[in-house]
């Protein structure tokens, strides 16, 4: 059965967005640390995958990304 939802007053939320200190916003990327394939389609070694992840993190840092998070892949 459908019940009526009261109208939400978003005035304060909009004011909060308009006065937000954007210097506190961080931008990040994440990945699962998977092992990519090389140009021949062969899965690269663990060492190569780690080097590639570090290289990507350095590039992300140079591009201004605040956080690079890695998880465990398959």
Image: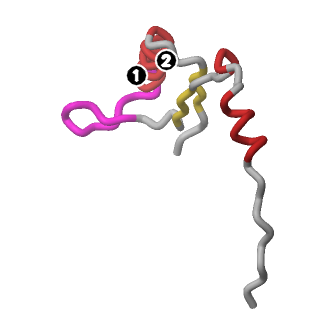
Which is more foreground, mark 1 or mark 2?
Answer: 2
Q: Residue furthest left?
A: 40
Image point (50%, 13%), residue name? 64
18 in magenta: no
Horizontal relation, residue 28 to residue 49: left or right: right
25 or 21, nearer to the observer? 21
Q: Give above or below for 44 relative to 54.
A: below
Picture quadrant of residue 5:
bottom right
Identify the magenta region.
36-47
Disc 1 packing (10 Å; few <14; some 14–19; many ≥20): some
Q: Give above or below for 62 relative to 25.
A: above
Horizontal relation, residue 35 to residue 73: left or right: left
Image point (77%, 54%), residue name? 9
Colouring style? secondary structure
Q: Residue furthest bottom?
A: 1
Residue 51 in the image, given as x and y percentages of width and height: 44, 17
Residue 65 in the image, given as x and y percentages of width and height: 52, 18
- Badges 1 and 2: C-beta atoms under 8 Å apart? no
Picture quadrant of residue 43:
top left
Disc 2 packing (10 Å; few <14; some 14–19; many ≥20): some
Residue 18 in the image, given as x and y percentages of width and height: 66, 30
Distance Cα–Cα, label 1 vs label 2: 14 Å
Residue 25 in the image, given as x and y percentages of width and height: 65, 23
Element under disc 1: helix
Question: For mark 1, what is the residue?
Answer: 48
44 in magenta: yes
- Magenta stretch: dominant secondary structure: loop
Horizontal relation, residue 4 to residue 60: left or right: right
Question: For mark 2, what is the residue?
Answer: 57
Element under disc 2: helix
Q: Give above or below for 36 relative to 28.
A: below
């Amino acid at each position: 059965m459908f019940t009526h939802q009261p109208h939400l007053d978003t005035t304060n939320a909009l004011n909060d967005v308009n006065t937000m200190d954007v210097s506190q916003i961080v931008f990040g990327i994440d990945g699962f640390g998977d092992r990519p394939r090389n140009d021949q389609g062969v899965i690269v070694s663990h060492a190569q995958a780690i080097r590639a992840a570090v290289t990507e993190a350095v590039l992300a840092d140079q591009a201004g990304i605040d956080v690079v998070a890695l998880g465990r892949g398959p």
